[in-house]
Amino acid sequence: MEEIALLNAALLLIEKLAPIVERQLKSGEITDEAQAEVRANYTKFRARTDLFSGPEWQPETPAPETQPPV
Amino acid sequence: MKKTLKEYAIIIAVWIAISGIALLGSGCHALSPTGVYKSDQVIYTVELMQPTAHEIIGTFLRWEMNNAPVLKRWPEIHKSAEKMRNNAAAWFQTVNNLHDAYKLDPSKENKDKLSQALAVIQAALLEANGYMIARAVQPKPL
């Protein structure tokens, strides 16, 4: 049962991402529309303030020293 | 025809690798020159990679958290997840800062710094992808 849960989680991720990735690998030219979509996604990403606030992002043991961003 | 899990994993690994090569200026993506990126492969790659990388790493961390009892058999997975939890925010912030610096001054020096920062995230992506695939195709410990 547990093994199936693990398998399903991995499958979900891969199946979700693979078609997007495959499309990008196959496309000869990235159209204006596709570029606009990437820019819009990134703009939304930069505006988010909750990127690392979910429980999955919280370390069990915080590192004693974390490298500051450049 | 439906692809196998292994094929999907390879596709994603290839994409991660190619995205890195693209940043170095020899990628295979051809940007339409009339698009918002004006053929700037570097900025395009970073802006594509950042949200995607966050999604993949977040999924890996959720998977690790939700399956912690089962995954105890592979302590290296928890160790890797904890490393990402402790450092990912700084990794992403660094890339964003260097992205902004490169946009203002697209010098070789800024491009090299950006490539190095992105390489750290790419390594984490490959690690996350690799662990999930390894456990999915080989669920029993050796």
Image (cartoon, grey):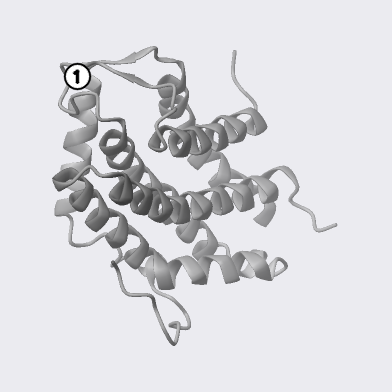
- Quick check: A27 above or below B138? above
* In-image side of A35 versus B26 (left or right): left
Residue A9, horizontal then vertical, whole percent: 54, 47
Please indicate, yes or no, whether residue A1 appears anywhere in the rendered image.
Answer: no
Residue drawn at 38 percent across, 67 percent down:
A57
- The N terminus of chain B, quarter of image: top right
- The residue closer to the viewer here, B49 or B118, is B118
Residue at 42 percent of width and 37 percent of height:
B24
Q: Residues within 10 Å of mark 1 (few under 14, many from 20)?
A: few
Q: Position of residue B98 (x, y in %)?
A: 26, 54
The residue at the point 25 percent across, 22 percent down is: A34
Q: Chain of mark 1?
A: A
Q: Nearer the viewer, residue B70 or A25?
A: A25
Task: Find disc 1 in the rendering and name its residue.
Answer: A33
- Seen in the picture, residue A7 relative to B3 is either above or below; the reply is below
Camera-nearest residue between B67 and B97: B97
Q: Secondary structure at mark 1?
A: helix
Above or below, B82 against A50 in this view is: below
